[in-house]
Amino acid sequence: MVQLLVQRKTFHNSRYRGHWFQVAVDASGVGGYDHQRDEQCLHRTSKNGKTTYFHSVLEARLVTLNGFSISIATEWIENPEGGEYDKQDCERKGFTRLAAKLKEVYPRLPIVILADGLYPYEGFFAICKANQWTYCVIFKEGNLPTVWEEVLELQPLQNQNIRQEVCYRPDGKTVVQVFQWVTGGNIKGHTLNWLACQETIRPTKPEASEEEPKTTCFVHITDLPINAHNVADTSKTGRLMWKIENEGFMKAKNHPTLKNLWLDLVAVMQWAELDEQELERINSTRRQFRFAN
């Protein structure tokens, strides 16, 4: 179904820079148990000696700014041989298998991979390069120390790479974003660009609220070219990674249940006036539903 939607250019207006489809990759637990249910059950032992069993899945989801989060490839995290579950090792091995599956199903699809701080490593860069994909991934301090050292060395030489944007939101708050970026980093032949967004949210009128300003810093690395004109969009694209959790995993875990369906139906009946003739007319009319960007 998703392949058909892609072929019909349903999501073309949501492509990044008019070219790349944004694909977020992340793992999520899908069940926890106090016993081993099957051979593929992952297990982890806590410091107090208690062993828990669970299943985890790695997903690739097509995400868009207007809220879509659609699964396009899935790979189960495998139980490591002769050892306990290690999130970093198991998820990275799962990504190797997921990438092969994704490339097989969508061999010519231009993709920008969005991922969390587990993915900035040489093997990930090599997979993306081999598949002709680009990427924009979260970069945490402590990941790739040599890259951080290089960024600190290049920052004074590229001190003109700074941009500020101010947005006045309808909820009465002001968002100030200060972007900084460094280009030309390198790790084992892979060119990397670093960008950071320091975002401060505060009341537009200080006297209107006692709420303290909130400052958050978002850091990414990418192989996409960065300049003053596209740094804000690049940062925003990197942050789309969270849609796989918010519009994907959280809704899948909490919403598609009979209980929630019943609550939605009750909510409709509480405010809607039902007209039997109108319902019969609607039921007798053929309709077609389409995705819209």
Image: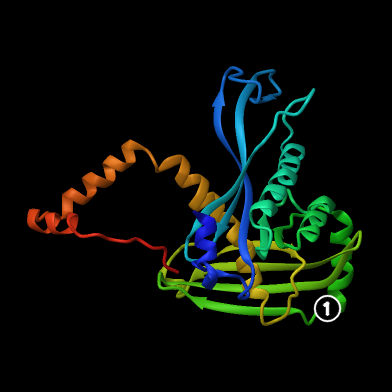
For the point 86% across and 54% down, which residue is it?
145
Res 6 quadrant in image: bottom right
Q: Is residue 115 left or right of residue 11?
A: right
Q: Count all numbered tags in the image, as a single digit.
A: 1
Q: Position of residue 118 (x, y in %)?
A: 73, 48
Q: Which sits in the foreground, 241 or 134?
A: 134
Q: Position of residue 77 (x, y in %)?
A: 67, 36
Q: Is residue 27 above or below residue 187?
A: above
Q: Label 1 sits on what residue type?
A: Gln
- Residue 212 visible in the displayed image: no
Q: Position of residue 292 (x, y in %)?
A: 42, 67
For the point 34% across and 60% down, which residue is it?
289
For the point 86% across and 67% down, which residue is it?
185
Quarter occupied by the C terminus: bottom left
| Dot 1 crowding, Cα within 10 Å, few <14, some 14–19, many 20+ | some
Q: Is residue 138 left or right of residue 34?
A: right
Tag 1 residue: 158
Q: How is the image coloured?
A: rainbow
For the point 46% across and 43% down, which residue is it?
252
- Residue 289 visible in the displayed image: yes
Res 89 quadrant in image: top right
Q: Is residue 97 above or below residue 207?
A: above
Q: Is residue 204 above or below residue 69?
A: below
Q: Which sits in the foreground, 108 or 24?
A: 108
Res 74 quadrant in image: top right
Q: Position of residue 112 (x, y in %)?
A: 67, 63
Helix, strand, or loop for circle 1?
helix
